[in-house]
Image (cartoon, grey):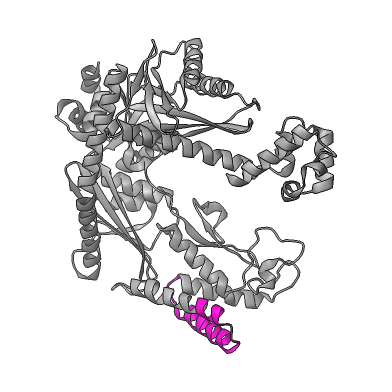
Amino acid sequence: MIDQKLSLVPHHPGCYLMKDKNGIIIYVGKSKNLKNRLTSYFKSTHTGKTAMLVRDITDFEYILTSSNLEALLLEINLIKKYDPKYNILLRDDKTYPYIEITNEKYFRLSIVRNPNIKKTKSKKLFGPFPNVTAARKVVDMINRIYPLRKCKNYEKKVCLYYHIGECLGYCENKIDGKIMQEVKNEIISFLNGNHKIITDKLKEKMTASANKLQFEKAKEYKELLDYIKVTLEKQKVELDDNYNRDIIGYYTKNGYLSIHLLFIRGGKLLDHQSNLYPMIDTLEEEIMTYISKFYDKHKVKPHEVIVPSIVDKDLLEEAFQLKFITPQKGKKKKMLDLATENAKNYLSEQLTLVERNEKLTKQALDELSNLLEIKEIRRIELFDNSNLFGNFNVSGMVVFIDGLPAKGEYRKFKITKEVNDDYGTMREVIYRRYFRVLKDKLEKPDLIIVDGGLGQLNVAREVLSSLNLDIPTAGLKKNDKHNTSELIGKNPIQIIPIDKKSSLFLLLTKMQDEVHNFTINYHRQIRSKGSLSSILDNIEGIGEVRRNKLLKKYHTIANIKEANLDSLSEILPKEVATNLKNILNEVEKS
């Protein structure tokens, strides 16, 4: 079938979509010549990730475009739409934060991700910051120096920041607009690389605090000065023309691509980012696709981008209305060489470790396949449940593909039945997940693992059977020390001890920790969002009347926790009051 379809593919630009046995799109690519590119997949010898991709392909389709530019833009949209598992380079692309100055009269400084350009045209954005800690440090420092508004919505009266001198009380006081504009201009100047304004203010504040014998405060200002001197001033680079630039270097070896970005803002090296990916497409296409996705996602663009000669600069300029250059000599060439050298060093540092981890992961998956008598295991979905005395029931699902977490496919489930029934929780979440898999024709896993014993495993199997799904299912059993010790295999029940020194034990422990932490964090989010009222709603024995009496008498969770049982028993039966105290104590501990 594939050979027949290949014979019909024209020598024309366009995008191609690779499909697996379930009809799921697993890879999207583009080419100036679809015939040559698609033929190379099926008529050539491949290794690494490309070989794995080709092995999974059972069908393909293609879309002709009128130009290379149209193919480039279409590829970006198709990857967004289908999120194919083999587009690893793009699925792992990070969203970097920006520092934003709002356009209000009494403006705020904040950190934002995925800024909406249509809504932020009149706002100032600075970045991106690959290191979110550095962005927070800068925002905190500016907020310490300038008494800016901190709250998103104006409070009815001044808050703590006003009383400690870090806000001018904009909710009650009217501040001259000219003063606010001067402050904004100074902050913008600093974020554009002029550090003198801030350092002068810090010196003034440090001296004033010392003169008032406020030595702790003076010390804090001194530490901020040191931060600017050591961290920011040393970032000055040779291209000191106050321009914003991105510099992209690459290096490739053994089927891996290392990409290194240097972010220069206001003539200073703001930050850098290293990435390492297994290659699937040609080197030129991998780099072009990476750059395209990066500037499609990061809307705030620099004045220019310095790139290696392998990329099609004209195509990128037309697509993103951005200047791309490849310098042949001079200072810019030195910076490009620096980015390339960084990419080479990063690949050298990481390659041995990555290859070792891949080898151990493959060994673990092969061992798991043999133990459970499954032909091949690529995709594993794991489930865990969490509740607090039967309240706030949630479940989490994590996905591992080829032994690596696929975080974009994690799912959270808020359980509708609020009773302390772990089997009921498992029944609901397995049904919801795999009914959705059937309904939406999602990719089925090669193995389902439930973090629990034989009871939970049997429930999961019953639900799958009711849906006419034949998916291998296993359980992870803990010993009396709460450590993973056994794998519960297929029917008839198969108890498999796990060697703690094996690669399989390390992989299963990693998976179990991942699903447990993911679920617990979701559980905490649910509880933290719950007000006192919603917490009371989830406790057996407390109905609307009793809840309203508690709210009227105590007002806050802290007051209820401090109340003794005799006091609570004036409203609640003693056993309900005891249960309430226990739950609140557990909430505090977790």
Relative to 584, residue 130 above or below: below
Pinpoint residue 346: horizontal percent, then vertical percent.
24, 54
**Residue drawn at 77 percent across, 45 percent down:** 564
Q: Is residue 305 visible to us here? A: yes
Q: Nearer the viewer, residue 13 or 577?
A: 577
Q: At 47% across and 36% down in the image, what residue appears?
A: 516
Total numbered labels placed on residues in the image: 0
Residue 106 in the image, given as x and y percentages of width and height: 65, 68
Residue drawn at the location 35% of the way across and 40% of the way down: 70
Based on the picture, tell me whether residue 204 belongs to the magenta stretch: yes
Report the quarter where the N terminus lies.
top left
The extreme left residue here reads 45
Could you tell whether 452 is left or right of 143 in the image?
left
Q: Quadrant of residue 497?
A: top left
Image location (x, y in percent) of residue 367:
26, 25
Q: Magenta: predominant secondary structure element?
A: helix
Quadrant in which the C terminus is drawn: top right
Image coordinates for residue 513, horizontal then vertical, percent: 42, 37
Instruction: Determine if residue 402 is in view.
Output: no
**Closer-to-camera residue (513/6):** 513
Q: Which residues are magenta?
A: 192-220
Taking the image as shown, residue 560 lies to the left or right of residue 502, namely right
